């Protein structure tokens, strides 16, 4: 199986902004074990800006673009150093891939990216992918790593895309506020009312950025990739997902014929 795993800042860091060492170590251990079982793994990772802000000792979260890009430049070094150190313990080599929208939309750039990613997989390296926040200008922003994961999944022909979040999946209401909210385990078509339920881009359902995840699922399904949204608080849920067991919310690229 070729699997793209996206991990968000909520999984990698505590609410203080400092690295969640336990979660990050467990994530790298599980992904290494999945690779050892013969699967191909690509990791789309957030967290650079937050880690950079912490390393720079910034009391408040950067707001202007220059400050965010500076923090991302520092944090990306820290993020990759941590991934390299942790994956090396389990005998796996990582590769850094930083992208802008042009890299995934321009035909020539996309072809080069495709070739690089497949050669890395051939070499059994684990690509760690992030948006190039330190240099991207507004016109070339991808914006959400949920969307980036879906785009990467399409480029490499992934069997599955997994978004690890701070929420267990798609619910009928915000589970943090409504105890009656129910998990929707399977979605075969993203209808307008589903997007409306997520509240739109300015009023997202839950703290997991559900609207952006639904839009990412739309992208994934359009290129023939199934997507799962699941909680990143216990990375070993990836074992169940790879084994085909039910977890979180699954978006079926095959629609009603799946």
Image (cartoon, rainbow, N blue to C red):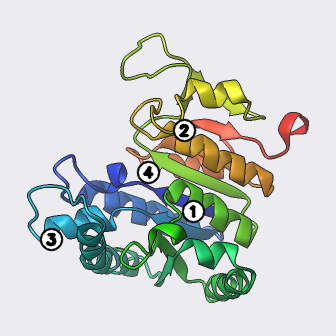
Which comes sooner in the sequence, label 2 or label 3? 3
- Residue 46 percent coordinates (x, y): 40, 62
* Dot 2 alpha-carbon crowd within 10 angstroms: few under 14, some 14 to 19, many 20 or more: many
**Residue 250 locus on image (x, y percent):** 67, 39
Q: Which residue is mark 3?
A: 55
- Residue matched to label 1: 148
Crowding at dot 1, Cα within 10 Å, few <14 / some 14-19 / many 20+, comes out as many
Question: Residue 1 is drawn in which quadrant?
Answer: bottom right
Q: Give the residue pinned by disc 4.
A: 235
Percent of width and height locating residue 251: 70, 40
Tag 2 residue: 211
Q: Residue at x 55, y 29 (%)?
A: 198
Give whichever of 222, 231 is nearer the camera: 222
Q: Secondary structure at mark 3?
A: helix
Give the CA distance from mark 3 to mark 4. Answer: 25 Å
Q: Earlier in the sequence, mark 1 or mark 4?
A: 1
What separation in Å lies between label 2 and label 3 (alpha carbons)? Answer: 31 Å
Q: Earlier in the sequence, mark 2 or mark 4?
A: 2
Q: Residues within 10 Å of mark 4 (few under 14, many from 20)?
A: many
Rendering coords of residue 73 (x, y %)? 29, 78
Lower sequence index among marks 3 and 4: 3
Tell me the crowding category of disc 3: few under 14, some 14 to 19, or many 20 or more residues within 10 angstroms, Cα based: some
Question: Horizontal placement of 106 versus 5: left or right?
Answer: right
The answer to whether marks 3 and 4 mark residues whose Cβ atoms lie closer than 8 Å is no
When the figure is inspected, residue 136 is found, relative to residue 227, above or below; the finding is below
């Amino acid at each position: 199986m070729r699997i793209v795993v996206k991990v968000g800042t909520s999984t990698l860091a505590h609410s203080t902004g400092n690295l969640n060492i336990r979660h990050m170590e467990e994530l790298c251990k599980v992904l290494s074990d999945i690779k050892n079982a013969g699967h191909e793994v690509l990791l789309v990772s957030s967290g650079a800006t937050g880690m950079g802000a912490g390393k720079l000792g910034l009391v408040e979260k950067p707001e202007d673009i220059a400050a965010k890009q500076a923090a991302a430049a520092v944090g990306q070094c820290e993020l990759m150093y941590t991934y390299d150190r942790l994956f090396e313990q389990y005998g796996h080599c990582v590769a850094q891939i930083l992208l802008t929208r042009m890299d995934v939309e321009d035909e020539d750039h996309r072809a080069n990216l495709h070739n690089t990613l497949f050669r890395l997989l051939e070499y059994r390296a684990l690509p760690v992918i992030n948006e190039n926040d330190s240099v991207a200008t507004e016109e070339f922003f991808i914006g959400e790593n949920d969307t980036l994961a879906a785009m990467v999944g399409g480029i490499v022909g992934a069997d599955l895309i997994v978004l690890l979040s701070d929420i267990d999946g798609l619910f009928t209401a915000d589970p943090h506020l409504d105890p009656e909210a129910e998990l929707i385990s399977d979605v075969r078509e993203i209808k307008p009312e589903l997007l409306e339920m997520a509240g739109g881009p300015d009023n997202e359902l839950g703290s997991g950025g559900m609207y952006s995840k639904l839009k990412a699922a739309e992208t994934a399904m359009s290129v023939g990739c199934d997507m799962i949204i699941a909680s990143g608080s216990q990375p070993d849920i990836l074992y169940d997902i790879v084994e085909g067991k039910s977890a979180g919310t699954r978006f079926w690229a095959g629609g009603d014929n799946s």
